[in-house]
Image (tube, rainbow, N blue to C red):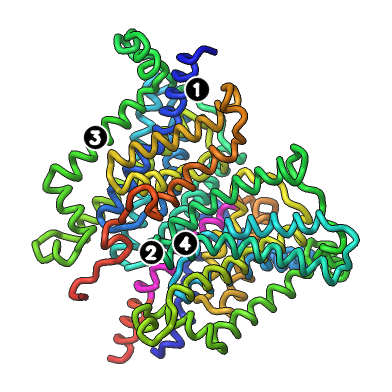
Amino acid sequence: MSKKWTVLAVPVISVLLGLLAGAIIMIASGNNPAAGYMALWNGAFGDSFYTGETLRQMTPYIFAGLAVAFAFRTGLFNIGVEGQLLVGWLASVWVGVAFVDLPKVIHLPLAISAGALAGALWGFIPGFLKARLRVHEVIVTIMMNYTALHVTNHFIRNVISDGSDATDVVNETASLRSPFLENITDFSSLHNGIYLAVIAAIIMWFMLEKTTLGYELRAVGYNQHASEYAGMNVNRNIILSMVISGAFAGIGGSMQGLGTFGNMFINSGFSGIGFDGIAVALLGGNTAIGVVLAALLFGALKVGSLNMPIESGVPNELVEIVIALIIFFVASSYMITWLLSRFKKKEAK
Amino acid sequence: MDTLTIIALIVSSSLFAATPLIFTALGGVFSEKSGVVNIGLEGLMIIGAFTAIVFNLTFDTTFGSATPWVALLAAMLAGGLLSLLHGVASIAFRADQVVSGVAINFLALGLSLFLVKLIYDKGQTDMIDSRFIKKDIPILSDIPVIGDIFFSGIATPTIWAFIIAFVSWFVLYKTPFGLRLRSVGEHPMAADTMGVNVAKTRYIAVFISGLLGGLGGAVYAQSISLDFSHATITGQGFMALAAMIFGKWHPLGAMGAAIFFGFAQSLSIVGSSIPFLDSIPAVYLLIAPYVLTILALAGFIGRADAPKASGTPYIKGNR
């Protein structure tokens, strides 16, 4: 079996196995899997409203997925996307609220840049600690997530607003809302962010595959020692990778703040987008195009699941189980490739 | 409030908050000492909390006042079983252990909420009746000053947490099994050469971490949250992970760190009623455990080094 084929086979088989397991769980709990999945499909693509919601959910997933994937290609595991997304969300909403009477061409990019900058800063800290002190980035980013959660909540309540649980809605000049997209999708919450997400995916592909910087980043991911020997500055590349990854995540937060919700509110727990981004990146094989496709799948699963209890009586948490199992199967790809190679050997005989 | 009452209140609520963290952090120590990273501690706590609450609600009439204790056993078993899934992925299937741990967290939350809706037809369970409560320890609490501070208002699981921490230390550092477990985590090939079964040892270690993680979640659910919903366990597992690192992968260190984090947590809650502390914004106390962990890792509070083979699957014959 050619290597290219295996690269495609693992995610596809993982998704199928995940859905199969979901069907078995539905049967075991006395539900009809066909009705359950039909409801899921209708809830994701049933009409233009649901399609709009799916695309809207896909938007931050693309950014979160790109963030995880970008760091992964440099050999770094950025679990901190969730925290970077939260600070990005806060920063862009803050800029969106604070400035009035700016023209849209300045205000909107400014607000998004603020989100990117905040996320980049949140990514810089683990990157710096990794590069300089060899501290494992996984633990630092997890701790940064919780720090972000409490810090953003504190800012919302005590700095931006006066003890209230949510910020004001961002000014029209910083908003990503699009009357056109809302009209064609029957007034879903789809906003202009979807265009930016696709552009971001192209930028990531170009940056990694077509520039010297991307080449260096990937080289560091493959083999740090060889890269060092070849004269690359490994430490600088590690920091840079985390900063860029954090910036992607931060813009993902801007999408929530300037588009989906229009403000930010006290979060008692995580939004989950950052953690789902890990699943998106893994399933997408850490490539730009893969991330976009995986984000579409997870967006559809998430949005569609809300329709499951209504139409088929299946609790929507079933989809969480399916997603968990998909990650599990992708992570255990050694098993899948091993089975595939066994299968092939038998055929050859 | 006089100073003594304040100190007694802080100590009592710190230990109360620290107890689930101690159990779970000890679970993390076992797993990581054997070379398997366990980000899934959060998920193990979730499944433990879920099992304990459901068990408690279902069998309350059968077991009476012993219900929370029997529920702990059920929760431990559930945690152990879920951790075996992590074990299979990271030991047999050579999965990225961090990714597998993330999957465990997703799975635990999804599965338990799915089952809650299936069983109770709503998003969260009822409150339990039989729970762990703070009690005064007989005799010891009568000692003046010390008795008031350390032996009043202590829940029984807290005492067990201390006992299990010392037992864990003894098992890991004073028994042949502990030596094997640690050697598998430091240098699996050398251990394999000496005839230690690497895979088996790691499975046992991961299973123990599941038992303790489930226990931690169950204690939390039955002493603090008292019901189960999506918001029951939000980060306690990761805080336990932080405690394990802050404690430098040592059972007693992890216990100390967990108590310290419990202290920070309880200060953020009771702090508003204490003069002097009420002027400090709660956010500093809330983020203290996490910031301190980062500082500890960065070497500002003594170097913390993970077991050498932590995170890498052992493949026979590879060098």
Q: Are marks 2 and 3 on the same chain?
A: no
Q: Residue at x 20, y 53 (%)?
A: B182
Q: Are marks 3 and 1 on the same chain?
A: yes
Residue on which disc 3 sits: B166
Alpha carbon distance from label 4 to label 2: 32 Å
Output the chain of dot 3: B
Indicate the amino acid at tag 3: Phe
Alpha carbon distance from label 2 to label 3: 31 Å
Q: Are marks 1 and 4 on the same chain?
A: no
Q: Secondary structure at mark 3?
A: helix
Residue on which disc 2 sits: A134
* Closer-to-camera residue (A261/A77): A77
Q: Which residues are magenta?
A: A317-336
User: From the viewer's perspective, is the residue at label 1 or at label 2 nearer?
Assistant: 2
Q: Is residue A250 visible?
A: yes
Mark found first going from the N terminus, 3 or 1 = 1
Q: Secondary structure at mark 1?
A: loop
Determine contact: label 3, label 1, CB under 8 Å. Answer: no
Residue on which disc 1 sits: B129
Instruction: Tell me if A262 is positioned left or right of B208 in this view.
Output: right
Q: Secondary structure at mark 4?
A: helix
Q: Residue at x 54, y 49 (%)?
A: A146
